[in-house]
Image: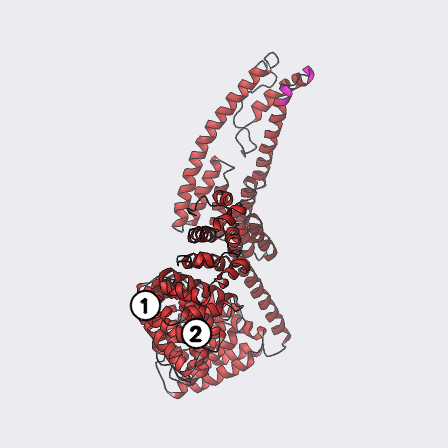
Amino acid sequence: MMDKLEDMESFLKNVDNISELVKDLKSSDVEVQQKAIKTADCYIAALDEPCRTKVNKTTINTDPLQPSLDLQNDSPETFMKIMERDAEDRRVRRNEKAKKATEFKDKGNEAYAQKDYETAMKYYSDGLAELRDMQPLYTNRAQAYIKLGRYKEAISDCELALKCNERCIKAYLHMGKANRALKKYKESRNCFQKIVEIDPLMEKMVKEYLDQVNLEEGRENQEMNARQEFDKGEGNGPRVPQLLEKFSRPGQIPLYYSGGLEILAQAVTDCTAQTLFRLNNGFSVISSNDTVRSCLLQETKDPDSQELCASALKLWRVICCGNDENQKMLMTFPLNRQSIVHLITSEHVAVHKECLALLCVYSRMPHGRHLAIDNLNVPMLVKNLMACISKPEQQQQNTAVDILQNFAAENKFCIQLRDVLTNSVIVPFTKLLRNISKTNRHVLASLISAIGCLARDDVICHSLAHDPECWKTFVVAIRQCSACEYKELIYPMLGLIINLSAITSPIIQEHAVSLCNCCLGLLRDSDGGVITRATGVLSTVLPQSPEAVQHVVEGGAIRTMRLILKGTGQTATKYAIKTLTVCTAASQLAREELVKSDKKLSILCHLLASSRDEMVSGNAALCLAHCLELEGIGSTLLGTDIVLLLLRHAAGDAKRTSVQQNAAIALGKLCRSEPRHKNKLRELHGFEILHSCMKLTTWTP
């Protein structure tokens, strides 16, 4: 392999030498030129394809003392033509070799796809025999070497690939994997970190690889420390192998094994004991025990068997808590994976409780969540968690909701729920919301937040937004919570509705009037947070229903929105101005109500002057434009700085072009409503500014 590196370095050096030789041939110094001519024939004889072996198989001039070309009498121009012709010949030969090398690469890729790594490696080697500086062949062969466990050879190929391309990400990726397999953790990290330096957008992927390095290094350190402490005989660790040996005795009654598991759980007090349990095949010992298997599969449900089942789950929890490698090991047994999901719904309180406690261990950290998602039946898991939430035990309800919410943070978890959302989530969720009580209202608040986490997935959000039962239930639940003053439920529910109603849906339109009617009642609530979110629901639902707009306008919403805009809450202001804009766009009555309560539209002018939120200022300008359609409104604004305010937004550098467009539209309507505003616009050179800044907006003063 060192020969290959030397070949490539020799090739690059020859390129530099030829470049210097050509310069010397063109030199005006006769002595320099003659010296170049004398050495040229030697270079022509020695040059071969890049990265070839040191053995010269093609000899142009077999006798250096008798040059085949009279370079001493030929001119530099003649030599240059010879060099150009030689270069063209080389280019043709290289293209032919590149074609053959590519064919070998494609055959290697096909073999690799069939998991025939030995054949793939041979094809890649054949390709490199044709073309030594083809970088993909090195990285592909390195990948095949890794599959074959030939890690040192993989690293050598990656180094050769980096000779061809020093920014080759695949080379660093495979070299990082190979070093990790060789337990060279520092070198592995350096390779993965180099990828981020080359392409910062790959940081997320690199983090996953670095996490794997950390896990493997941590496992190795754990096992080394555990063996050392075992040899010293310190702590409870040394007891673990002895207890496992006693537990492995066949044919004992359930109480014998149950007691053994309890003693084991008490002995596992630290990482050393957890590691010794794994190193002494503890998982296999327990999972292969016929009596334990029968209990975990619920083949027998007598009290002693149920106690044994609970003891096994408890031991798994103790063994896996804070130990990533043990969590991984537990999931390698099909029996464990199956029982963890099904025992959630056990009627035996201790079994049910211990199963949830074990799942809680997995749900706390990303590594554990990924293991569970990759190995468990996720749809069944969620369905059983929802069933658990429906049970009366409050502690178990809260644990089940916490598990669901933790898992909902993972994209892969949400993806696996997309096709089964109705049966696994929506049906039990709506059933619970229709049966709110004092005993379950606290857990339902957390459940609504968990459903909100699931709704971050676009497909799940779309499904919820188009589900009729969801919207019927929301209306029923809001009315019940309003009557019973369950504000801890109203607040998260309104937040979920705001997110879902951002999607246009005929189902939302169908229930818009009822939903907005509920929100009108909530606008009179004493809790500012509830008022803000009720306004948020109006701002997202009203654009989907003209009937709902008319309903809320007649219900006095315009005056309430104006009062909200006098406050200082940024979120409330954003929702309220959008609601006003939607209402004034669709309703003559809304425009009249707003002008009646604020003749000079001072609240809109204030937002245009003070708000730094482009959405707020853009909606304020549009709402003003709607009101200017009323007769005489332009005259009431004479003497104000409205022209200047609108011109600033129309000619500003807002990131949202709609802000500029809305301001320009409002200016146009202002000048039509009251022509005297044109004079102010001229004073401010407004026409010139608008014509230069509003090329994409049509407006007429």
Q: Residues within 10 Å of mark 1 (few under 14, many from 20)?
A: some
Up-down relation of residue 18 to residue 591 (above or below)? above
**Magenta part of the protein: which range?**
23-31
The x, y position of residue 216, in whole percent, is 55, 62
- Residue 371 visible from this viewpoint: yes
Name the element at disc 2: loop
Dot 1: element = loop
In the image, is 464 to the left or to the right of 680? left
Callout 2 amino acid: Leu
Q: Nearer the viewer, mark 2 or mark 1?
A: 2
| Placement of the N terminus among the 4 image quadrants | top right
Disc 1 residue type (three-letter): Asp
- Residue 12 place in picture, x, y as percent: 59, 33
Residue 450 appears in the rendering: no
Q: Which mark is residue 618?
A: none
Q: Quarter-wise, where is residue 384 in the image?
A: bottom left
Sequence-wise, the earlier of marks 2 and 1 is: 1
Decide: is 161 above or below 176.
Answer: above
Give the labeled residue for mark 1.
Answer: 467
Question: Nearest the camera: 332 or 167?
Answer: 167
Position of residue 305 measured from the top left corner of the image (x, y, whole percent): 40, 84
Q: Which mark is residue 523?
A: 2
* 307 or 445: nearer the viewer: 445
Q: Which quadrant of the figure has residue 520? A: bottom left
Q: Residue furthest top?
A: 73
The residue lying toward the viewer, choosing from 232 and 155, is 155
What residue appears at the point 39 percent right and 79 percent down from the top-left corner? 388
Up the image or down, 447 lies above or below 85; here it is below
| Residue 576 magenta-highlighted | no
Crowd class of label 2 (few under 14; some 14 to 19; many from 20; radius 10 Å): many
